[in-house]
Amino acid sequence: MADPDRPTATPTPPAAADVPRWTDAYFQRTRQVVERFGDRRVTYAVFMRRPVVAAHRLALDWLEAMAAARGFAIEVEVNYPEGKWVGAGEPMLWITGPFTGLVELETLFLMKLGPACVAAYNAWTMCAGLPKVAFLAMDARHCAGTEMAEIMAYAASVGSERAKRKAGAVGFVGNATDATAHWFGRDRGLGTMPHALIGYAGSTVRAAEMYRETFPDQPMTVLVDYFGREVSDSLEVCRRFPDLAAAGKLAIRLDTPGGRFCEGLDPPQSYAVLDRRVPHAIRGYRDETELRYLVGPGVSAAAIHWVRERLDEAGFERVKIVASSGFNPAKCRLMADAAAPIDVIGTGSYLPDAWAETYATADIVEYDGVKRVKVGREFLLRR
């Protein structure tokens, strides 16, 4: 199963006593029927309808804890270890145990499994597509509660490890919250300042000064889009902190909203930047979404190249660029194609855009050792 050297976490809720309240009612009724007419030992095949990366540790930790708390034993056959690619419809796990014990756990087990596997797949895709870029998991605010935040951070770490192994990628180097930092080998979450701090300070440079005075020994990343002066404020911050800039301990973060262009750009100028830096990126057919990522408003490939040019011209070659705002696998692919000079990407968008893709499914395929499954699902049978 999972690598024992990887971090572990307390099984996610609900506790054993709360399971009946949170499971599907027909599973509760099925348990009552089976208790009346006689229990059987069953085997569930667990699969997904799309390719994923196996990220089943939290789900299995919970399942094993529930079985122990409810007084029965299970056997788990893992067909795809954590971090392995799993094809659509392939049984990821076979789980065997008493029907009366397992039936009420299906709903909750699947809700912990599916989203993690899809998020791990997306994290892997992003990291492998931009192997030289470090990623930060900024997913917490995109999650529906702390349990989901735990699952998503875990999933990002699984996808990241696969990208490191398969593509030599830097991968995810940390995340935004202390509670889930352990999945990335850290004690604390990463991050410096939100837009609110710049609004409070009244200027980008003053916010940087206040941050530096409060945390004098830390590297610093400064948001530069608050006043729509991405280039001007970046250069002002660099000139205010030349030692940090020269030491490579200063970064500027581009988070330009999609409603406007980065300072100094418009559509013609954006095309000109890419034509100058990576002409192949704008040759050939691009659909509307791809063009937006390349030369549109917001944090486009052109904007990143543009800011990098301005920093280098001013002698700040060692200042890093952190990019955020809508970075999902598709946007990362376009950034790679455009050779965007990004050092770090902050993303929460590896959460699936289509939530229906996260649905995991479990079907019983054996009753007391006798193979039986509904017509059309014979591919799940053990051979």
Image: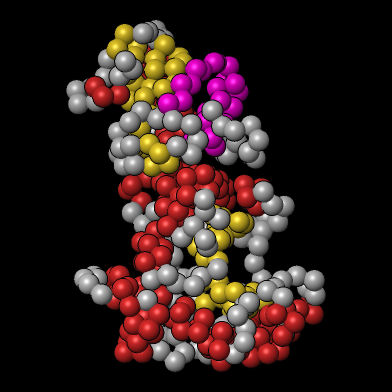
What residue is shown at x 53% (from left), y 87% (from top)? 310
Q: For this rendering, which residue is in front, 196 or 158?
A: 158
Vertical position of residue 334 compared to residue 158: above or below: below
Vertical position of residue 333 compared to residue 162: above or below: below
Q: Answer left or right for 381 relative to 317.
A: left
Quick check: is 60 in the magenta stretch? yes
Vertical position of residue 378 compared to residue 219: above or below: above
Q: In the rendered structure, which segment of residues is drawn in magenta?
A: 55-79
Which percent across, then down, holds residue 249? 69, 73
Res 259 quadrant in image = bottom left
- Label count reads 0
Res 363 quadrant in image = top left
What residue is shown at x 44% (from left), y 76% (from top)? 299
Q: Quadrant of the C terminus?
A: top left
Q: For this rendering, which residue is in front, 260 or 219?
A: 219
What residue is shown at x 40% (from left), y 39% (from top)? 85
Q: For this rendering, which residue is in front, 140 or 322?
A: 322
Q: Answer left or right for 162 relative to 293.
A: right
Which percent across, then down, holds residue 174? 62, 56
Whether residue 12 appears in this view of the structure is: yes
Whether residue 138 appears in this view of the structure is: no
Q: Answer left or right for 184 relative to 382.
A: right
Which percent across, then down, holds residue 115? 43, 45
Quick check: is 358 in the magenta stretch? no
